Amino acid sequence: QVQLEESGGGMAQAGGSLRLACVASTRAFRTTAMAWFRRAPGKEREFVATSNWSGLDDYYADAVKGRFTFSRDNSKNTIYLQMDNLKPEDTAVYYCAADPLNYCSGGGCRDSNEYNYWGQGTQVTVSS
């Protein structure tokens, strides 16, 4: 069983910044694919960002590319999502996801079906 604890959500104005963090309770964090997804009101859950296991290669949804930065600190079992130049359309509940069962070997997967564990979600609200 892997527990994921998210933090850092809140309110921001358009153009502002927020930083999300997610701590995972797994001894195998270095070989666990991790990602961020989000669900906006009335919409399906969608992929936001991820990286490979080492964190050297990261991947983004087109909607956030150039504004959001994914990072992971394997020494702290933590992933981060730095969100800059926020837009009202970024308003959503953001979820941390983990794949300790290695459906996504190596990391870098965008399909939510590859992830087995999910955080409780943290609300991000961006006002115009």
Image (cartoon, rainbow, N blue to C red):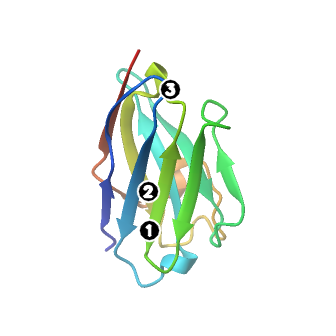
Which numbered circle lies on residue 78? 1
- Tell me the SS state at disc 1: strand
Determine contact: label 1, label 3, CB under 8 Å.
no
- Tell me the SS state at disc 3: loop
- Give the residue number, with chain letter if any, for mark 3: 15
- Separation of marks 1 and 2 at Cα, in angstroms: 12 Å
Question: The N terminus is located in which quarter?
Answer: bottom left
Residue lying at 38% horizontally and 31% vertically, measured from the top left: 92
Which amino acid type is marked by label 2? Answer: Ala
- Tell me the SS state at disc 2: strand
Residue lying at 46% horizontally and 31% vertically, measured from the top left: 16
Question: Viewer-proximal residue, 5 or 128?
Answer: 128
Residue found farthest to the right: 57
Question: Viewer-proximal residue, 5 or 111?
Answer: 5
The answer to whether 31 appears left or right of 3 in the picture is right
What x and y, as percent, mark residue 127?
Answer: 37, 19
How packed is label 2: few (under 14 Cα within 10 Å), some, or many (20 or more)?
many
Which of the 4 image quarters holds residue 64? top right
Residue lying at 43% horizontally and 61% vertically, measured from the top left: 116
Which amino acid type is marked by label 3? Answer: Gly
Q: Nearer the viewer, mark 2 or mark 3?
A: 3
Q: Nearer the viewer, mark 1 or mark 3?
A: 3
Determine contact: label 1, label 2, CB under 8 Å.
no
Count of numbered circles in the view: 3
Which numbered circle lies on residue 97? 2
